[in-house]
Every structure is written in structure tokens, then in C-alpha cells.
Amino acid sequence: MTIMAADPVLARRAEIQQIAEATDHRRRLLSSLALLACRGCLVITLIPLVALLAYVVIRGASAWNWAFFSHLPTPAGIPGGGIWNAIVGSLIIDGIAAAGAIPFGIAAGLFLAESNGRFAGTLRLATDVLAGVPSIVVAIFAYALLVAHGLHHFSAVAASFAIGILMLPVIMRASETAIRGVPSMLSEAGFALGASKATIARRVVLPAALPGLITGVLLAVARGAGETAPLLLTAVGSQYFSVSPTQPMAAIPLVIYGNGIQAYPDLVKIAWGSALFLVVVILVLGVGSRLLAARLRRVRRD
Amino acid sequence: MTSLATLPPRPGTGGRIRRLLAVPDGVYRGALGAVAALFIIVLVAFVTALVIQARPALAHFGLSFLTSTKWDPVHVHYGALVFLVGTLETTVIALVIAFPIGLGCALALAFGIPERLRVTLGPAVELLAAVPSVVYGLWGLLVVAPWVRTIIEPALAHITGGHGPFSGSQLGVGLLLAGVILSIMILPTMVAISRDVLMAVPDVEIEGAFALGATRWQVMRRVVVPSARAGILGATTLATGRAMGETIAVTMVIGNTDHFTHSLFGTTQTMASLIANEFTEATEPFHLAALIGVGLLLLVVATIVNLAARLLVRSVGRQRALGIGVL
Amino acid sequence: MTDPITIPATSEASPALAEPVPHGAVMSLRDVSVAFSGKVAVRDVSFDVPINQVTALIGPSGSGKTTLLRSLNRMHDMTPGAVVSGSVKLGTLDVYGPTMRPTLLRSRVGMVFQRPNPFPTMSIYDNAVSGLRFNGVRRKALLDEAAESALIAAALWDSVRDRLRAGAGTLSGGEQQRLCIARALAVEPEVLLMDEPTSSLDPSATKRIEELIGELKDRVTIVIVTHNMQQAARVSDSCVFLLMGEDRAGELIEAAPTSKMFNAPSDSRTEDYVKGRFG
């Protein structure tokens, strides 16, 4: 029983099928090639990551020894220099920055999580603006406030101020997200028991949001620890050991920057060693924050 | 009528302190609001301080600050055009490289690889974002620049005959290297956000296309990418903003000369690298004010781009925490 | 390598059918099972799909109707871990055979989904011809002709003929579903699979589509999944009743012409279902 071809539907059907058959091979070939190209892009994206980490590990590890971590820098050409002052300096600068940014950021995040009005909207906009400000511009601000005026000379607190400002949007957003993620059931139970908002925040919401808060804080610290531009204009680095926040201070990113552009091989070596150290610290903070957060969540679920 | 505040304290919990800490709601909200307000005040103070500091130079040079190409601390003449162009050039190069590769990579992550691979490779790409700028600069200067100088630039000059954008001495450092390093740095942003918006395209649309006889590429090209285009545009704009503000890595590889270059092999400066290089050495008063003026210009440009990006990304409903996409 | 549109004069009657199908089957299933990562969802289903008729797959939710439907146009290819066994034939072609290309299969066996899914970034016209373009058709005259014919068949032409360039989002839910039907029809498939096409629509839109189905069966063979018995009774010529067994896999209980299934079913479970005693 064959079909009569007078029916336009059937005529079209035959023509369409014929075209489909004729073009099928080409279409599928194109699809395979395109997918291959996309996968190629994925490989291309990962190559610099591998290359960079490989070089940092190889050249940095060769610089690591006891002297590297415990000694102070030596003048160019004299071996045995270390970054002890920079390690301490970074700890102090980032520590002060975090000490300021964390309470501020969590409080602001808490505010945002609990409000939805125009003021909150403006605040969110401000956070977005601040998150996009180039770090060198924040550095200028810290300079203007605390170096040109303030203390009238370079100092570590100026650096902490700048880095704190850079940490702030990260902490605020992470806090808001973490706090919003707490099931409203919990705070409603608190209300039903007659507790005040402050109490609920302190005893119910913040503890419940702790995993997210910790992740946000550690990521912000990781980001702050890697910043160089703010340090250039404020703490400017130092060859000496100092714990005085009102004086210039050494810091790891400055060591990398300052030594990396030098002609002396032993200084360059120190730059690589510091780079490896910085990358390891950031990795540990990042991975550690995830593990810690996962652990806290598991504990809470039980 | 009893309230919580007057119930006898539970043993061992410091009843009096607890009562003190049962802060009235009004005070609590007020305190938080004050903190939030402080934040906005700081931001406003920020911009104001910049404007005040920059004013001497801006007032003195007027519009020529933006249009003049001479930056001369010795003869006290400051024009920022070279650096504005430098920022734009490096950004454009970075985007030209990072946009197609980033989109292709995102497509691969979303549709081209099995689930278990995606779970490991996705975070791997985001790892790129965790590397600090100064480490990129170090690697770019000491490892990639020699490659560029000895292999890539000669090859490019050979293929193109060494004219126009491929002319001039081959130093390794310069516009090309800065653009390439920058592109690597903005790839994670491009990829992560694009991947998210691609995967957010509703399954029903994708199924509908397959059910009509489309190949995988046809589905991606005709259905998924068009559906996701607002988000992809947002990702690109965000990456642009990041590229414009990037300071240290660029400073270390761009060669740092205060003039235009007509060749990709040549050296120049961006607004950010200029500030990083000259700020602490600026003794002449106008110099500092001019640098801060450049900073203000950079702030304005970067902020416009970033706000545009936020609008685009939020309009797609993506709430991925930008800036927390590190690790 | 086209299979010319010849229909075998008779089909092999399978034991599950109440009586031999008179006009021949455009698709036939034998012992079809679908499993996802080892878990069987549908087990050993066999029936024929008679040409130019409406066959309804009915049964309570979870009985595997949609899973079975999707095995007809190889939609499970997209699901990792899905395995389809048994024989599915389109005419004499093995749908799951090594030489069958899914893209071509789907140009002959179209699908309409539960929720209208027009492509949001395309205009009404582009939606209607999207299937044709996917299959390599470029000739404008053919595209226009097929689009108009399909939109007329979907009872949408009069409403949209003046705004073909408008976005698909400007249509109501019922109109969007009819656009999806037109989109599927434009490719001139031999079979149209419909997966609960009216379940997200209001009663009047539902009614229009049910009328449409009656009009379409001269042009395409229709297999429709519906959880609404009354709809099955209204639109279908024959029904296939599926039920979930103790192993949570759907199996075919009875396949029969609609009038028999609803008035004098052979199996007591069928009777229970069509009388509304469960499901």
C-alpha cells in the first residue's frame, strides 16, 4: 500500500525527510567538532593554572629552608636572608584588618539579612560599589586619611585600614547569605518564647549561621592576605623587624613584588619562596574554611 | 504579669547579666542601623576625600587632564589620556582572549563533560581566581615574559610580516603580555558565572529542542546560549571591571613607560600601574594630586562598568556571590 | 536510506491486544523495559500503535506512562544510566538499532510536553520553523509553507498571522501549547507523542486542544499520555492501561480499543481504574 503524493502534507514530509537525511551527517559532524572545541577551551583554561602552580612550587620550594622562615632580610648579594619580618608583618596587618572588618561586616550583614527597605537597598548598592573598587584606589583613600593626614608617615595601621575595607564587602555578603539561610522556623520559635531580637540574633541565628560566616570570613582573610596594592602606599615594607603598628612594616606580598623585579638571583629566589608560602596559606584557608564549615554543619545536624 | 526579665534566674547562668543583655528591639535595630550607616558614610567620605585631594590638579589642568597625552612631572604637565588608553587596551586584549575561551569552557563544563568530571574541574577553574595578583605578576614576569620574547613575539612578527601591531622591538614585557596575563586572571569570573547561567536554562527548553531533532551543538547555539545571554553579558561586564582595576600583575609585566604604543609588543602604562609606580615617589605637590585624579578617573570608569554588570547579572536572578567565588 | 512510507498490511497481533489491529501499526513495541541505574521503571510492555489513530497511555501516577512514551523517541538517551531494552519499531526500522540516528528519528516522531516550552528568545515564526531549521531546511518558501500549514492545523494561524515576529512570550498558556504543537507538526512527523499536554492548562484551553487532537489524527498518528480518564475516553481510539507492580515497575495490564476498555474491560484492575475506584 503506497501513499499517493498528491497530498501536500505528504509531499512536504517527503521533501523534509530528504533534506534531513542529506544534511544529517554534516550536522552531527559540526556538533562533534564544536563540542571538541569547547572541551579544548576547558583544557586551555586549565593549562595556565597547572603551569603557574608548577613553577611556583618548583622554584619556591627550592628557596624554603629554616633560614628562609626565621631570618630577616639581608642586603642584596648576601645569602641567608629570610622573610621572618614579613610573616610577622602580614600577620599583624591582616590581623588588625580582620579584627576591624569582621564585627563590622557581620553586624552589617545581619542588618541586611533582616531588612528589606530602601535603606537596605542603598546599603547593598554601596556594597556592590565597594566590591568593584580597584584596590589601588582604596589604597589612595587609606593614604589620604592615615598617611598624608593621620599619622603623617607610612604605617601598618594604614595598611590594615585599606585591607579591612577590601575585606568588608566579602564578609558582608557572606554574612547576609549565611544568615538568610537560617530557617526562619528557628527565629520564629525564639519570638514565640518571648525573646528579644537581640537575644535571638545572638543565641539562635548567629550560631546557626556560623558555618557560612566562618567560610566568608576565612575567604575574606585569604583575599586580604594576597593584596599588594594597598600595602604599596601605606605600609611600604621594611627591611627590619617591627611590631609597631604606627610604623612601616614588612609584608609578604611586598616581598614578592619588591624582590621579584630585582636583578639579583637570591632576591628573586626569596620572591618565589614567598609566593609559594602565600599560595599555600591561601589554599589552606580556602580548603580549611570549607572543611570546617562542613564539619560544623554535620555537628549541628546531630 | 511575669515576663522573661523578672523570672528567677536559672541556676548558674548569671541572671543579672542576662537581663542586661536582653536588649530592647529598638536599641538593637538602631545599633545595627548605625553600623550600616557608618559604612555608607565611610564610602561617601572615601569619594569625597579623593575629590578633595585631586582637586588642585583637576582645577589647574581642567579638561586637558583628560585629553592631554603628556605626563611630565618635571615640567609639571599632567594629562591622563595615555593611561586611560592603556587601561582600555589591556582590557580589550584580555576580553578578546577570555570571552570566547571562557564561554567555550563554560559550555564544556555545563554540557560537554560527565557529572563527576564537572565536580572536580569546576572548582579547579575557580582555583585560578584564588591566586593573588602579585603571584600572577611574578610568574608573568619571570616565566611567561621570556617565552613571549623568545617564541611568541618572533612567531607573530614572522607570520604577519612585522607590521603595525606586530612591529617594534620584542621585549617580552609589554601590552601583549599584560593582556594575556589579564585574560588568565579574568577567565575564572567569565567561566564560573557563565557556567551557572548556562546550567540555569530550564531543562524543558533543552528537551524541547532535542525532541525536534537538534544536535547538541544546535541546542547549545540556538537555545541555551541565547537564553543565557543576559547572564553571559553580565559575566563579561564583570570581568571587564576586574580587568580595569587590576594593578599589581599588570604593573609587573607592562613595561611601564609613560607613552602610547602602536604595537602589541610595545610598553605603556595603565591608570592603575601608573599610580602604583609613581605614588610613593611623588614629591612635587601637583604630581600627587594628579595621581589621585587618575585614581578618581579609574574609580569612575570601574564603578560604571561594575554597576552595569550587577544590573545584568541580577536581572537574570543569579545570586552567585561574586567575590566569594574564590576557592 | 529512507524508509519509504509504506505500511505493512497487517501487524503481528501480540497476546496483550484484545484483537488484531485492522489498519496496520506505524510503531510497535515488544517486551520493552526501561531501567534507570538498575532500577526498573517499566517492564515488558508490548503493544502496537495503529496508524492515524489516537492511542492513549493511561494509568495512575507512577505507572511509567511518561517513561514509556519517552522511550519511543529515544529521549532517555539524554539520561545517564538509563537503559531501554526490548524492541521498538518505527515501521520496519529498529528505533534502538545501531544504524538509527536519533536526530532523524526525532524528525519523524515528534513530541509535545506537559508544560508549554516555546523557545523564549525566538519569535512565533522562528519557534514554528525551529524544528525545520534544526533538520537542515533553509528554503524560505518551504519554511513559510510548513509554518502556515502547521499553525493552521494547530488552530493558531488566525490569532498570530499578523504578529509572527512577536515573541512567543506574548501568547497565553493555551496558545503557547498550541504553538508547541505547531512547532512539532511543522516537521511533518509521522507520529506525535503528547505527554499530558493539557495538564497545565485551564478547561477552555484544554477543550480546544482536545478538539485539535481529533482533527490532527488524519495527519499524524498520536500517542498521548494522560492521567485524566475522561480525557482518554474523549479523545482516544484505543488505550493502553499501565499499573505499577509490587516491584514498583510499571507493567501493561490491558490494551484495547477505547470503547471496550471503558465499557467491558477484560481485567478487573482495568475495571477498577476506569470506574474510578482508585488512581
Image (cartoon, coloured by chain):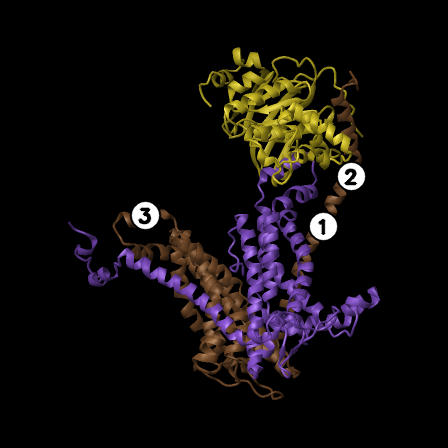
CA neighbours of label 2 inside 10 A, class few (<14), some (14 to 19), many (20+): few
Can the viewer see residue B284 in this picture?
yes
Identity, as a three-letter code, of the amino acid under mark 2: His
> How far apart are the alpha carbons under marks 2 and 1?
17 Å
Q: In the picture, which chain is yellow?
A: C
CA neighbours of label 1 inside 10 A, class few (<14), some (14 to 19), many (20+): some
Residue that carries the numbered disc 3 in the rendered image: A188
2 and 1 marks in contact (CB < 8 Å): no
The residue marked by circle 3 belongs to what chain?
A
- Quarter of the picture holding the N terminus of chain A: top right
Q: Position of residue A170 (x, y in %)?
A: 48, 62
Residue A35 against residue A211 in the figure, above or below = above
Residue located at (65% from left, 50% from top): B108
Residue that carries the numbered disc 2 in the rendered image: A25
What's the colour of chain A in the image?
brown
Left or right of residue B28, residue B288 in this image:
right
CA neighbours of label 3 inside 10 A, class few (<14), some (14 to 19), many (20+): few
Q: How many marks?
A: 3
Q: Name the outermost residue toward the left.
A: B1
Q: Earlier in the sequence, mark 2 or mark 1?
A: 2
Q: Position of residue B157 (x, y in %)?
A: 81, 68
Can the viewer see residue C242 in this picture?
no
Q: Quadrant of residue C21?
A: top right
Q: Earlier in the sequence, mark 3 or mark 2?
A: 2
What's the colour of chain B in the image?
purple
Q: Which mark is residue A36?
A: 1
Q: Earlier in the sequence, mark 3 or mark 1?
A: 1
Viewer-proximal residue, B71 or C266? Answer: B71
Identity, as a three-letter code, of the amino acid under mark 1: Leu
Viewer-proximal residue, C56 or A292? Answer: C56
